[in-house]
Image: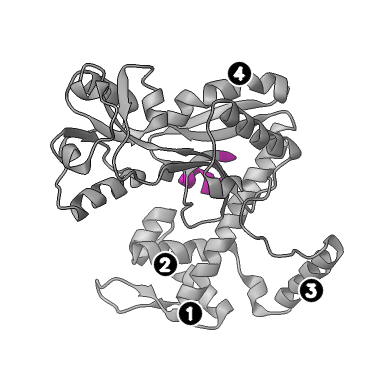
Amino acid sequence: MAESARTRDRAPTGGSLARLTLERASVIASSQWAGLELRHLITLEAVARHRSFRKAALCLNYTQSGISQQVAALERIVGERLIERPGGSRPVGLTAAGEVVLRHAESIFHEITAAQADVEVLTRGASGMLRVGAFQSVSAEVVPELIRRLPDAQPGLSVDLVQTTADSELFALLEEGKLDVTFAILPLPQGPFEAVELFADPIVLLVSTSSPLARRREPVTLEELAGLPLITSHDCRYLNGFEARMHERGYEPEVVHRTDDNGTLYGLIAGGVGAAVGTQLVADGAKGSVATLQIEEPLAPRRIALAWRRDREFPPRHEAFLELVRSVCRDLGLEPTAAAAA
């Protein structure tokens, strides 16, 4: 994939990297750590997550004695006690050494899922399928034009679109190797992710076209917003700042309904149930059934990006896909923030 705005460390050259890898493998092979198996680490993670040998056994379909044997084997390999066993019905926990091993195990799990996904890409073939994640507003406004142009821009490549209402779900699928790339909202969550910002999506107020506010030209004040019945989502991180600002100014938003479905949102607004603070891209998806107004003291725009796992091997055609996405966004009048464009 193309470089993001982040600075990358200088990587070793191919020859030096191969020598370094062989040297590391030789060191591991000559130590007791050579006996470490992936199942040992999977067992450690399950015990740490459930804080119980019994529950870990149920999760992994092992016997409880099997879990104990796996942990004991791992502790012999590491040479340290990894699990605190208080006895009785009290939950178990990791020792300091256990925390260190689990932290490195999580990196190994990431590498394994990346390898699985890369092998699957090879299996699908060079022309194959690109698994792309998106949320509702991007699916409605950007993806149709993207798919329309794809046959001419990249013959033989097709898109398998996975849509969710929250980008947290998309990042989970990306981390599991079930997506190749995904549209996302910046900033990125913790994880093995890289991204390029595509465009900024301004925060606006959505009202019914029959509302007196629809004919207004001046921005709506926070005091006026406090007097409106509002429709919002159950959990939308880019709107959390709006409610926080209202509270800072001493206003309590009157939330009359919450929905994560844009179609339901449009229907509620058009039906006069309430107004909604959303983004311009969400409003564009209403196709004229709602009107938009600027908000006084505007919030920072939602920043839309294309993200992928930085530890994945991507064929050149995926870089061409990124360029196609950028081109589609530009042609739709969707531009990145000034900092990202610089």
Label 1 near label 4: C-beta < 8 Å? Answer: no
Q: Amino acid at mark 4?
A: Arg
Judged left or right of residue 208, residue 72 is: right
Label 2 Cα crowd, 10 Å radius (few <14 / some 14-19 / many 20+): few
Residue for badge 4: 148
Residue for badge 1: 97
Q: Amino acid at mark 1?
A: Ala
Gap between marks 3 and 2 measured at Cα:
37 Å
Earlier residue among tags 2 and 1 = 2
Earlier residue among tags 3 and 2 = 3
Q: Secondary structure at mark 2?
A: helix
Q: Identify the mark at residue 65; answer none if there is no mark.
A: 2
Magenta stretch containing residue 152, yes or no?
no
Earlier residue among tags 3 and 4 = 3
Question: Viewer-nearest of labels 4 and 2?
Answer: 4
Q: Residue at x 61, y 69 (%)?
A: 36
Q: Position of residue 96 (x, y in %)?
A: 44, 80
Indicate whether 201 appears above or below 154: below
